[in-house]
């Protein structure tokens, strides 16, 4: 039996969904994988922190945060002054790092993950910043300390992207990829096809919590570029920053352009692509009209797709529908299982 002490750094929608998923799968983890766990630390920016070596009741923690309370009421020790102190005091075996992403340099998440690894924790994250800015460094740190740095949920939530190449496709070399990786822009374009203006479609995406108050990260292609950079960096072995991805968003797609595509039997999609050229990779994010012969054509709403071209299987596609905190949480759960069992 493997028992793991868990720490959560960041306990927003994803962290709470993960806590609920862990509770729901608790018996299955024990029976199927011989894994048991205790949550010993939770730290947030808005709801305080709790450290309890004897175990924090995750149901109480979720209820506390959702009611606007302070996690300090669940703590057996005074709240730590900062995240680094929290990591040193909680003495966990596994860190789930889910702080807000910093596209510019990946901090402070990189520092949190590095500290966790140096303290002997497996470091698991849904944060794209550390992958695009410090993948090699964090992977090397993990190896030096006999720990794992996993990040399945950074692209397409819980869909098996990184673990696919790490485990199920040994010796496969990735030659290129294409996909629809930003669910917000895909939803906007789908609703524009239904007759809404760009502004109306953006407002709808904001009303259901898919788009931020400032939607520029999605509609201008930055989120998609970060995902392409992460995929290239990890799966193709070529470090790539988001600024190196040729990028064009969807602001120029007007109702007239939507009508033109329909007349040609095509649809507009924000296409992410990358292809190896010698020791370099050419990567881009840009709107394209795709026809019925493309696997991207039938991708509606918030559904995502990625198509890999390898040297051994030709083209292989993965589709994810209905993404949300629950699917991101599953990617973290899968990373947890892999980290303690491998």
Image (tube, rainbow, N blue to C red):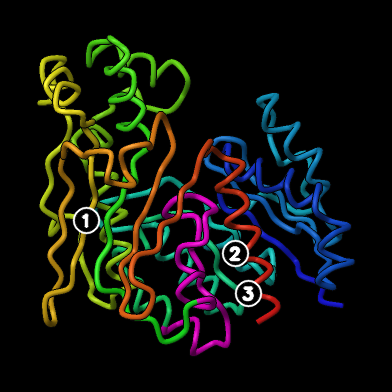
**Circle nearer the viewer, 2 or 1:** 1
Res 87 label: 2
Q: Is residue 152 magenta?
A: yes
* Residue labelled with disc 3: 339
- In the drawing, does residue 299 fall left or right of residue 327? left
Bin the neighbour count of mark 3 within 10 Å (Cα to Cα): few under 14, some 14-19, many 20 and up. Answer: some
51 over 187 or under it: above or below: below
* Residue labelled with disc 1: 273
Cα separation, mark 2 vs mark 1, equals 38 Å
Res 27 label: none
Of the residues under marks 3 and 1, which one precedes in the sequence?
A: 1
How many numbered badges does the structure rendering display? 3
**Circle nearer the viewer, 2 or 3:** 3
Residue 53 pos. (x, y %): 81, 62
- For the magenta stretch, what is the residue range? 140-168
Cα separation, mark 3 vs mark 1, equals 30 Å
- In the drawing, does residue 177 fall left or right of residue 34? left
Q: Is residue 64 magenta?
A: no
Determine the residue positioned at 47% across, 19% down.
Answer: 208
């Amino acid at each position: 039996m493997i028992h793991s002490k868990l720490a959560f750094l960041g306990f927003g929608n994803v962290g709470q969904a993960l806590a609920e998923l862990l509770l729901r799968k608790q018996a299955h983890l024990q029976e199927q994988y011989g894994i048991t766990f205790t949550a010993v630390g939770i730290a947030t920016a808005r709801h305080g922190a709790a450290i309890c070596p004897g175990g924090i009741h995750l149901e109480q923690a979720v209820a506390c945060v959702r009611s606007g309370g302070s996690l300090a009421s669940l703590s057996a020790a005074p709240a730590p002054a900062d995240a680094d102190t929290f990591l040193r005091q909680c003495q966990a075996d596994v860190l789930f790092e889910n702080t807000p992403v910093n596209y510019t340099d990946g901090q402070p998440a990189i520092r949190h993950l590095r500290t966790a690894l140096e303290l002997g924790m497996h470091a698991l994250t849904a944060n794209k910043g550390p992958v695009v800015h410090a993948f090699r460094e964090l992977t090397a740190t993990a190896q030096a300390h006999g720990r794992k740095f996993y990040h399945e949920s950074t692209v397409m939530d819980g869909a098996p992207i990184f673990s696919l190449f790490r485990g199920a496709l040994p010796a496969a070399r990735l030659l290129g990829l294409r996909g629809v990786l930003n669910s917000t822009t895909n939803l906007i374009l789908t609703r524009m096809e239904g007759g809404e203006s760009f502004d109306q479609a953006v407002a709808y995406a904001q009303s259901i919590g898919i788009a931020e108050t400032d939607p520029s990260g999605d509609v201008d292609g930055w989120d998609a570029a970060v995902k392409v950079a992460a995929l290239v960096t990890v799966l193709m072995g070529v470090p790539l920053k988001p600024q190196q991805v040729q990028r064009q968003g969807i602001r120029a797609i007007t109702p007239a352009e939507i009508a033109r595509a329909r007349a040609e039997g095509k649809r507009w999609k924000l296409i992410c692509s990358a292809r190896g050229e010698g020791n370099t990779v050419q990567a881009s994010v840009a709107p394209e009209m795709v026809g019925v012969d493309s696997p991207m054509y039938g991708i509606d709403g918030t559904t995502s797709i990625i198509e890999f071209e390898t040297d051994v299987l030709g083209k292989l596609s993965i589709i994810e529908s209905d993404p949300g905190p629950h699917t991101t949480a599953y990617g973290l759960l899968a990373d947890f299982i892999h980290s303690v069992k491998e």
